[in-house]
Amino acid sequence: MRKSLMLAAALALAGPAAAHDYILAPARPNKLVVVDTQKMAVEKVIEIDDAGPTPMVPMVAPGGRIAYATVNKSESLVKVDLVTGETLGRIDLSTPEERVKSLFGAALSPDGKTLAIYESPVKLELTHFEVQPTRIALYDAETLERRKVFEAPRQVTMLAWARDGSKLYGLGRDLHVMDPETGALIEDKPIQSWQAETYAQPDVLAVWNQHESSGVMAAPFYTARKDIDPADPTAYRTGLLTMDLETGEMAMREIRIMDVFYFSTAVNPAKTRAFGAYNVLESFDLEKNASIKRVALPHSYYSVNVSTDGSTVWLGGALGDLAAYDAETLEKKGQVDLPGNASMSLASVRLFTRDE
C-alpha cells in the first residue's frame, strides 16, 4: 500500500507527459514514415495500398495519432492511424466519368474536423476530355463524407486554413481568401501584380506545406528590378512571400540578390527568421529582410521545416534521408535515413507533436 501511494505521488509530481516533435515523411512508392526527432530514429513505417507513385501531402490531426495523405497520383486521400499503422478510410476523388487531381492543394482545419481538397476535374467523354471548373471540396475528417463543394480560382497550388478556421487561403496567381462556410471569395491579395512599377512579375515556387510550427505559410519567389539593366546580374532578386495564418497579414519582401534557388522556405515559431533550402541552406532575418548565413548541403533537399522550439531546421524531400541542422549556427546535428533509402521526391515533410 505504501509503495502504491509513493508511486502515485511521484507520478503526480512528474506532471503531465511532455509533448515532443515527430516528423511524418512520405516515401516512394507507398510509405508514410514516422520519425522520432528526439531519438533521431524511425519509429514506424506505414504502407498504404494503391498509393503510388508516392504519397504527396500528409496532414496530421491534433493529438498526433491520426493522419491523412493524398495518394494514388493525387486522385485519392487516405486516413491512417499513425500508432497502429491501420488505414481507417479512403476517398477516391475520380469516377469513371470524371478524373480528379488534387496535386498539392490539401489542408486539414485547425480543429481537425474538416479536410479541404483543391480539385482539378476533367470530364471523360468517349471522344474527348472536357476541362471542368476547379473547385474546393470539404470533407468530414471523421467520416470522410463530402459536406460541400464550391468553385475556386484556377492554378492554386497550396491551401491553408486560418488559425481560427474562419478562412481558407489558396496560393496561386494571387493569394485568394475564401469563406469556407459559403464558398465566397473574400479578397485577392496581389502576388503577380505586386509592386509592378518596380519589379517584374514574380515567379512563386509554392508546393510544399510546412507551416505547422509557425502558423506562417511561406514561399520563395524570384523577380527582377525594372530600374536595372537586365544584362546586369544584380537586377535579379530573390523574395519571400509570407502569409500569417493567425493575423491574416501577407507580405512580399525582397531578401537578396538572386544567385541560387530555394525550392521551399519555412518560418520559425517566433516569426523572426526564415530558412530556405535546395542545394544550400540559408537563414534570413525577417525584421531586416536580409540574409544571415548560408551553408552548402551534401545533396538537394526540397522541403524544409522548423522544430516547435525553433532550435532545429529539418530538411527532407528529394532523396531518402532527413537532415537536422542547428537553427542558429546552421551546423548539422544529425541525420535519419529512411528504410531502403526510399525517395521522398516532391512530397511535403510535416512536423507534429504527440504527448509521451
Image: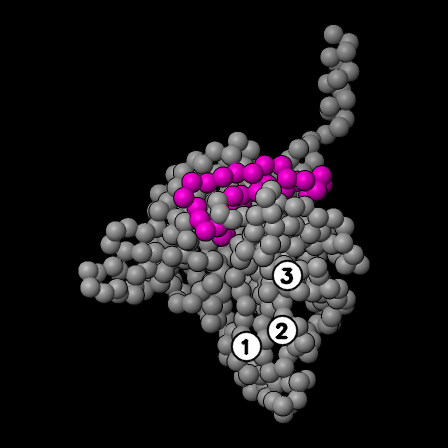
Compute the Cα span from label 1 to label 3: 23 Å
Looking at the rendering, in which quadrant would you find the N terminus?
Answer: top right
- 161 horizontally vs 211: left or right: left
In this orientation, which residue lies closer to the viewer: 15 or 128?
128
Q: Which residue is labeled 1 in the image?
A: 202
Q: Which residue is labeled 3 in the image?
A: 300
Residue 1 vs 24, above or below: the answer is above
Tag 3 secondary structure: loop
Q: Residue at x 67, y 76 (%)?
A: 259
In this orientation, which residue lies closer to the viewer: 55 or 289?
55
User: Is disc 2 in contact with disc 1, using a CB cutoff of under 8 Å?
Assistant: yes
| Figure colour scheme | one colour
Q: Residue at x 71, y 39 (%)?
A: 39
Tag 2 secondary structure: strand
Q: Position of residue 352 (x, y in %)?
A: 61, 45
Looking at the rendering, in which quadrant would you find the C terminus?
Answer: top right
Q: Residue at x 60, y 42 (%)?
A: 339
Q: Position of residue 84 (x, y in %)?
A: 53, 31
Tag 1 secondary structure: loop
In the rendered structure, does residue 59 fall within the stretch colored magenta?
yes
Q: Position of residue 350 (x, y in %)?
A: 58, 50
Q: Amino acid at mark 1?
A: Pro
Residue 71 vs 206, above or below: the answer is above
In this orientation, which residue lies closer to the viewer: 250 or 328?
328
Q: Amino acid at mark 2?
A: Gly
Name of the residue lying farthest toward the front: 340
User: Is disc 3 in contact with disc 2, using a CB cutoff of under 8 Å?
Assistant: no
Q: Residue at x 24, y 54 (%)?
A: 97
Residue 148 seen from this side: no
Residue 257 vs 177, above or below: the answer is below
